[in-house]
Amino acid sequence: MSYPSSSSSSPIPLSNIYSDKVANVLCRIPETSGALSLLDETRRLKKARRMLVAEHVYGLVTTEPVLTCQMIHEMTGLIVLSYEIVRKPGGNDGIFLYDGLMRGSAGEHFGSREQLLCFDTKVNGNDTKHVRRSCHPNALLKHVVAPEGKLGVILVASEDISKTMEVTLPFDADWRDSNSTLECSRHKDDMELCQMEKERRALAADRSLYGSSNDLNGNEKGYN
Ligand SMILES: [Zn+2]
């Protein structure tokens, strides 16, 4: 497929590249009050950067202590709808599913699952392309809608994080649909200890027994 190029040389707020379909979704969403100043502050005060966390393995690591709910770093990349990109359920290789646009104030989902966004941070990405997943993550993604239908997505601490600690995100919402081993940074040396991997493995075994299949655009399984 080909992606449109709607990037700009303007530093704010045009860091991302959007597919036409994403642009059509974003232009219908109200602007977030104070979005530009929030993004500007996040860029000036970013609290993490790429560092080696194991041999030949990069992660995103804090450069100062971060308190719960504080912004850590903006995530940038190519933003497409989930069905516009080939991805592994649960997330992998710098591709992040973002369902925050399709949640109401109480956390409930609305809209079509096909309208879930995907960040491909290998395109136009910054240090957040190295963020790894964990069954015990310490950060999550939040968004603001800037003027002209531009989106800012920010890693926010979900717990207090000390200086020089790796920042991790949850697996994508459809991790239960994965038929391959999760890549959990916490349990990478012994995935037998990872409860999420145990659950995923059991579900995959059930699917192979009963022949059921599900994916992001299929039934509701794994989407919560
Ligand atoms: Zn784990």
Image: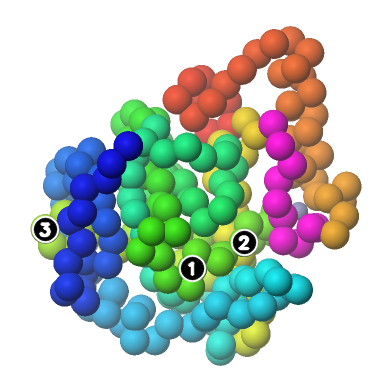
Q: Where does the image place residue 157, in percent across and percent down from the top left?
A: 53, 70
Give the residue drawn at x 56%, y 53%.
93
Crowding at label 1, few (<14), some or many (≥20) Cα neighbours within 10 Å? many
**Magenta highlight: main SS:** loop
Farthest residue to the front: give it.
2
Q: In the rendered structure, which amino acid carries the disc numbered 2? A: Arg
Mark closest to the chain's N terminus, 2 or 3: 2
Give the residue drawn at x 72%, y 61%.
185
Q: In the rendered structure, which amino acid carries the disc numbered 1? A: Thr
Quadrant of the image for the N terminus? Answer: top left
- The residues tagged by marks 3 and 1 sit, at their Cα atoms, a distance apart of 24 Å
Residue 142 shows in this picture: no
Q: How is the image coloured?
A: rainbow
The span shown in magenta is 179-188
Q: What label sits on residue 128 in the rendered view?
A: 1
Task: For the residues labelled 2 and 1, say whether their Cβ atoms are less than 8 Å apart.
Answer: no
Q: Which residue is mark 3?
A: 148
Vertical placement of residue 216 versus 127, above or below: above
**Quarter assignment of residue 99:** top left
Front residue of 26 and 161:
26
Q: What label sits on residue 132 in the rendered view?
A: 2
Q: In the rendered structure, which amino acid carries the disc numbered 3? A: Glu
Vertical placement of residue 45 versus 114, above or below: below
Is 5 left or right of 197, judged from the image as shown? left
Give the residue drawn at x 66%, y 78%.
52
- The residues tagged by marks 2 and 3 sit, at their Cα atoms, a distance apart of 31 Å
Q: Where does the image place residue 94, in percent across and percent down from the top left?
A: 52, 56
Q: Where does the image place residue 134, in percent across and percent down from the top left?
A: 67, 57
SS class, disc 2: strand
Give the residue drawn at x 42%, y 71%.
126
Is 130 left or right of 183, judged from the image as shown? left
